[in-house]
């Protein structure tokens, strides 16, 4: 019998427009391959949760007082596997915030629990060249966890050089390379389409971006590229789906208006995870202009699983998923 403990910031169903919804879907799939799965969190949002019998949501206490919430969360998460060490075979950490990293470190230190850490990207607590006080502290936690875990999962060999910038002494023999996955039952070419996006297209071709709206993801670069495309082809639109800092998104919206493209560049905002496949099926091209810090972005895999051709920057593991001239 294999019992696994993992962690998530918030337990949300697929109606939520967040990464937590994606993580939760992963855990639902993981539960099919283990005897017992404990998902530890301090926040449960009831959104269409359909949990299998062998999956248990463990809600920890939370002291939501500014300035001490983070520290107490590290302690609660860190000691949870220690207290249940006899009932856990493996710790599986899919995210890498300090509370989850502390669970790996404390689990090894006090209970000798084997663990697996997934690093989904390569800008870990900021760009490698950045070294602010808080980032230094978080990276210290990261190094403790990397030293304590049994295996480190990277999506691509292209990620390793940047990961080593954070921990040059990392024991590379513990690294395994496993490509990111996608649920091809939900993400497939056949199925319902997005009425909202079809109405915005009005028969025009649609370039779609799905993900966080920030500088790292190169959304500003994507809009600049679309300006060039729009001068050559007036029969296309750009749809941007995802949440972002209000100030940054606001500046992009203003730039689009000043460029006279507000009838062709659409900011869809956060979209429930359950509706994302509909967007892919309604678009014509998927664009991903990331500047760095990636593994193999899930959005690219989801879009291609829905039959979309993809255009993307050559960053980290992306060339292993998007092959020039092929897909």
Image (cartoon, grey):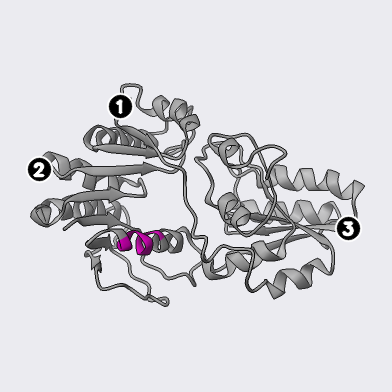
**How far, Cα to Cα, is label 1 from label 2?**
24 Å
The residue lying furthest to the top in this view is 169
Residue picked out by circle 3: 235
Q: Residues within 10 Å of mark 2 (few under 14, many from 20)?
A: few
Upstream in sequence: badge 1 or badge 2: 2
- The answer to whether one can see residue 46 in this image is yes
Q: Is residue 286 above or below residue 283?
A: above
Q: Relative to residue 213, is residue 57 drawn left or right?
A: left
Q: Position of residue 74 (x, y in %)?
A: 24, 50
- Name the residue nearer the viewer: 144 or 35: 35
Residue picked out by circle 1: 173
Number of residue marks: 3
**How far, Cα to Cα, is label 3 from label 2?**
62 Å
Q: Position of residue 49 (x, y in %)?
A: 38, 75
Q: Residue at x 62, y 55 (%)?
A: 303
- Name the residue nearer the viewer: 134 or 284: 284
Do the residues bearing badges 1 and 2 touch, measured as CB atoms within 8 Å? no
Q: Residue at x 68, y 45 (%)?
A: 327
Q: Residue at x 58, y 70 (%)?
A: 275
Residue picked out by circle 2: 110
Q: Residues within 10 Å of mark 1 (few under 14, many from 20)?
A: few
Q: Residues within 10 Å of mark 3 (few under 14, many from 20)?
A: some
Q: Magenta segment, which residues?
A: 26-32
Secondary structure, mark 1, is: helix
Secondary structure, mark 2, is: helix
């Amino acid at each position: 019998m294999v019992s696994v403990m993992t962690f998530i910031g918030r337990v949300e169903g697929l109606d939520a427009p967040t990464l937590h919804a994606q993580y939760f879907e992963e855990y639902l799939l993981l539960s099919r391959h283990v005897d017992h799965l404990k998902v530890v969190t301090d926040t449960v949002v009831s959104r269409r949760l359909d949990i299998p019998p062998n999956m248990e949501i463990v809600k920890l206490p939370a002291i939501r007082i500014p300035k001490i919430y983070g520290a107490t969360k590290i302690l609660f998460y860190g000691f949870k596997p220690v207290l249940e060490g006899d009932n856990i075979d493996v710790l599986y950490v899919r995210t890498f915030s300090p509370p989850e990293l502390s669970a790996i470190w404390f689990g090894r230190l006090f209970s000798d629990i084997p663990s697996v850490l997934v690093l989904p990207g390569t800008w870990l607590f900021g760009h490698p060249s950045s070294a602010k006080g808080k980032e230094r502290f978080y990276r210290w936690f990261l190094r403790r966890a990397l030293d304590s875990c049994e295996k480190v999962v990277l999506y691509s060999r292209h990620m390793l050089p940047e990961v080593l910038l954070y921990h040059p002494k990392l024991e590379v023999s513990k690294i395994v390379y496993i490509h990111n996955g996608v649920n091809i039952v939900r993400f497939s070419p056949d199925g319902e389409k997005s009425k909202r996006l079809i109405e915005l297209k009005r028969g025009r071709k649609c370039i779609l971006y799905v993900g966080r709206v920030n500088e790292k993801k190169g959304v500003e670069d994507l809009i600049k590229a679309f300006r060039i495309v729009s001068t050559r082809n007036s029969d296309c639109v750009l749809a941007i789906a995802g949440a972002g800092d209000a100030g940054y998104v606001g500046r992009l919206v203003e730039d689009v208006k000043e460029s006279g493209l507000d009838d062709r560049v659409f900011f869809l905002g956060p979209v429930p995870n359950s509706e994302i496949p509909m967007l892919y099926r309604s678009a014509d091209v998927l664009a991903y202009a990331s500047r760095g810090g990636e593994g193999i972005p899930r959005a690219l895999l989801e879009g291609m699983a829905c039959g979309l051709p993809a255009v993307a920057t050559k960053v980290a593991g992306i060339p292993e998923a998007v092959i020039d001239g092929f897909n």
